[in-house]
Image (cartoon, helix red, strand yellow):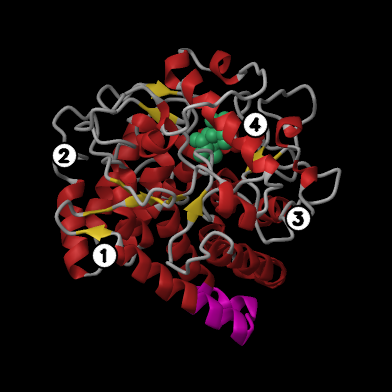
């Protein structure tokens, strides 16, 4: 039987469309933003040039505001996906990239700088001149993406990123329930879902109630011509997302670390340092010492979003937890509310705490374990010096994935694979976990 590394590489090759990679073969046939960043990390273990191409292709669809769209529609008509470009109609915005590029009008967590740094770390000496030049060319675009997040998505200069839509990362997470429930009338135009027939059981996907609201929110964004000022003035879904904000902090640090390689200007370095400080301070203000978690909030109503999910570990994801926060977060991580729950098959972080009433073990972001989230946490724990816990997480993650098909997410109690098989970002993080080895703990 092929090694795990070969099988993971085969998933990326199987989903490779030449210059970009499908997020998965059937359910997600286009180029997704944060998937692409993880995928580039996977490619970096196989071919650093191909890894750079992945990011370059994504940034080719960057908006003039600096926003990197959550999805670039790249697959042809043989690969239907709903909602497609017609639903988004981003031509209403002067900031959207010109045809033939077609994108959505929202964004996803900025994992890209982490990918760029990983690519550079994995570049063999013989390839460094070429890759350095390509990093130098891409770097200003990544800075401009970060500038968009630090300004357009944070007009209050709070250090926290405002999200406009559940599709900006963790779709049906119970974090969004209250905000969505407040939308009493959500009657989007007629539509037919395609996603539910791509998984063995539709209950592994968001509900129709969710989809009505997801699609109605897109219609609203389109009405505001995807203009951040208009959106801020009128939109019903404005949430300060501590997870997104934490990834932004980690990404600013990664970009700052690459400043010399990229020959960054003094002005860009100063901006990065400023966003980093502001992001850290913003997250620190959202840390609730009593629960040991960071708390999202609804910008419209000011309401605190206290539901227990993986996002509460924002100080870990940001990799900036100070002594007190770090100890509290590590205790919480292995408490019965999260990885220490005795029913868990593996000691991995579920997307929603099993102690939450909203927890659903098979339903997408409402309970299952997502390998990419555990990869982010593993990297954070490694950087924060918790290497023993990080190594357990790596081994448990690889054991969970086992001889399977690199699924999108996993049932936390049984370890059953769920969602799409051959999910590119899952295979990509496996390649990074193995880091050139064939099996967990084995030699290269
Ligand atoms: C999921 O989201 C898409 C919409 O963007 C979907 O459900 O159709 C999410 O898990 C998202 O975070 C991810 O980037 C995307 C592709 O893997 O799938």
In the image, what residue occupies the spot 53% across and 38% down? 167
Query: For this rendering, which residue is in front, 180 or 19?
Result: 180
In the image, what residue occupies the spot 49% across and 68% down? 252
Q: CA distance from mark 2 to mark 1?
A: 20 Å
Residue 102 pos. (x, y %): 77, 41
Q: Earlier in the sequence, mark 2 or mark 1?
A: 2
Q: Secondary structure at mark 1?
A: loop
Pointer 4 residue Cβ closer than 8 Å to ligand 1: no
Label of residue 14 in the image: 4
Query: For this rendering, which residue is in front, 54 or 338?
Result: 338
Compared across the picture, whether 314 is left or right of 299 comes to left
Q: Earlier in the sequence, mark 2 or mark 3?
A: 3
Q: Earlier in the sequence, mark 4 or mark 1?
A: 4
Q: In this figure, which residue is indicated by the disc labeled 1?
A: 385
Q: Which residues are magenta?
A: 256-273
Q: In this figure, which residue is indicated by the disc labeled 2?
A: 340
Q: Secondary structure at mark 3?
A: loop
Q: CA distance from mark 3 to mark 4?
A: 33 Å
Q: Is residue 13 visible?
A: no
In the image, what residue occupies the spot 34% across and 39% down? 397
Q: Sort mark 2 into few (<14), some (14-19) or many (20+) by Cα contacts within 10 Å.
A: some
Q: Sort mark 1 into few (<14), some (14-19) or many (20+) by Cα contacts within 10 Å.
A: few
Residue 114 among magenta residues:
no
Image quadrant of residue 310?
A: top left
Residue 185 pos. (x, y %): 52, 26
Magenta span: predominant SS is helix
In the image, what residue occupies the spot 67% across and 66% down? 127
Q: CA distance from mark 4 to mark 1?
A: 36 Å
Q: Is residue 390 above or below residue 168?
A: below
Compared across the picture, whether 306 is left or right of 163 comes to left
Residue 365 pos. (x, y %): 40, 33
Q: Earlier in the sequence, mark 1 or mark 3?
A: 3
């Amino acid at each position: 039987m092929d090694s795990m590394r070969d099988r993971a590489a085969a998933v990326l090759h199987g989903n490779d469309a030449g210059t970009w990679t499908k997020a998965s073969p059937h359910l997600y046939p286009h180029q997704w933003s944060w998937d692409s960043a993880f995928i580039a990390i996977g490619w970096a273990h196989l071919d650093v040039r191909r890894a750079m191409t992945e990011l370059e292709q994504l940034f080719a669809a960057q908006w003039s505001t600096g926003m990197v769209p959550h999805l670039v529609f790249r697959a042809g008509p043989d690969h239907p996906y709903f909602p497609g470009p017609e639903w988004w109609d981003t031509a209403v915005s002067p900031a959207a990239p010109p045809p033939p590029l077609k994108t959505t009008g929202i964004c996803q967590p900025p994992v890209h700088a982490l990918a760029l740094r990983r690519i550079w770390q994995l570049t063999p000496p013989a390839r460094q001149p070429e890759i350095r030049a390509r990093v130098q060319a891409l770097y200003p675009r990544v800075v401009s993406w970060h500038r968009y997040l630090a300004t357009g998505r944070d007009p209050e200069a709070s250090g926290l990123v405002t999200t406009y839509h559940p599709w900006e990362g963790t779709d049906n997470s119970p974090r969004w329930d209250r905000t969505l429930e407040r939308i009493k009338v959500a009657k989007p135009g007629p539509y037919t879902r395609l996603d539910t027939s791509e998984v063995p059981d539709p209950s592994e996907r968001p509900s129709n109630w969710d989809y009505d609201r997801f699609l109605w929110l897109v219609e609203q964004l389109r009405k505001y011509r995807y203009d951040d000022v208009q959106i801020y003035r009128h939109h019903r879904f404005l949430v300060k997302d501590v997870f997104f904000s934490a990834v932004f902090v980690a990404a600013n640090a990664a970009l700052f670390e690459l400043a010399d390689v990229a020959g960054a200007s003094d002005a860009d370095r100063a901006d990065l340092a400023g966003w980093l400080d502001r992001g850290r301070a913003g997250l620190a203000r959202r840390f609730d010492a009593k629960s040991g978690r960071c708390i999202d909030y609804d910008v419209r109503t000011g309401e605190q979003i206290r539901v227990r999910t993986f996002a509460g570990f924002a100080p870990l994801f940001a990799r900036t937890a100070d002594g007190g926060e770090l100890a509290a977060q590590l205790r919480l991580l292995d408490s019965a509310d999260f990885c220490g729950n005795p029913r868990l098959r593996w000691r991995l972080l579920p997307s929603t705490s099993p102690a939450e009433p909203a927890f659903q073990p098979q339903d997408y972001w409402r309970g299952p374990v997502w390998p990419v989230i555990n990869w982010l946490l593993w990297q954070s724990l490694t950087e924060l010096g918790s290497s023993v816990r990080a190594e357990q997480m790596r081994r448990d993650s690889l054991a969970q994935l086992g001889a399977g098909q690199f699924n999108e997410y996993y049932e936390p109690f049984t370890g059953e694979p769920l969602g799409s098989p051959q999910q590119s970002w899952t295979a990509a993080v496996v390649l990074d976990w193995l880091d050139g080895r064939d099996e967990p703990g084995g030699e290269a």
